[in-house]
């Protein structure tokens, strides 16, 4: 009698392998649709102007009338942009900007509600 593959065992092993490799994402994760330009309202009456490139690889912020260009980075936040000195974190309707780990602007919120959608894969 030939050994036939047990398809349910193969499915479990394949799923476990994909999970371990980070290939599977839970569908239905809520994501905020961030506009390319928004002026966040921050603590202390400050405004944090943020412009993002459409492909989300770069962002620009205005600090003391100086434009600072930031590149996308890794973060637990929905989006992070940094140049090594400044770091901008965008997560839903919230944002904050740090310089060398010290918060310059924050907490900040969107002055208008932002649309949300569910990411499916």
Image: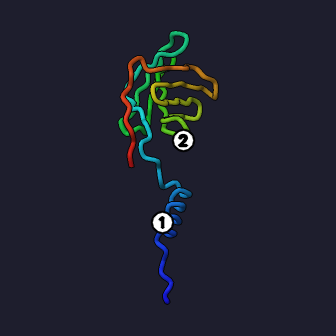
Q: Position of residue 13 (x, y in %)?
A: 53, 66
Residue at the spot x=35%, y=36% of the render? 54
In the rendering, which numbered label is found on residue 11? 1
What residue did someone put label 2 on? 74
Q: Is residue 30 above or below residue 9?
A: above
For this orientation, the residue located farthest to the front is 1
Image height check: is 15 above or below 27? below
**Residue 108 in the image: x percent, y percent?**
51, 20
Q: Secondary structure at mark 2?
A: loop
Give the camera-side residue of 8 and 51. 8
**Residue farthest toward the right in the current orientation of the protein:** 101
Q: Is residue 30 above or below residue 62?
A: below
x 49%, y 27%: residue: 68
Q: Is residue 54 left or right of residue 42?
A: left
Q: Residue at x 48, y 81 (%)?
A: 4
- State the separation of the CA atoms marked 2 and 1: 31 Å
Q: How many numbered circles does the render carry?
A: 2
**Dot 1: what SS?**
helix
């Amino acid at each position: 009698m030939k050994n036939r593959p047990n398809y349910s065992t193969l499915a479990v092993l394949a799923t476990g392998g994909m999970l371990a490799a980070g290939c599977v994402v839970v569908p239905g994760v809520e994501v905020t649709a961030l506009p390319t330009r928004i002026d966040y309202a921050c603590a202390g009456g400050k405004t944090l102007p943020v412009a993002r490139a459409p492909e989300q690889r770069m962002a620009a912020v205005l600090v003391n009338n100086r434009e600072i260009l930031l590149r996308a980075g890794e973060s637990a936040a929905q989006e992070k942009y940094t140049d090594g000195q400044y770091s901008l974190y965008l997560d839903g309707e919230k944002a904050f900007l740090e310089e060398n780990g010290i918060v310059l602007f924050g907490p900040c919120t969107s002055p208008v509600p932002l649309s949300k959608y569910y990411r499916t894969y």
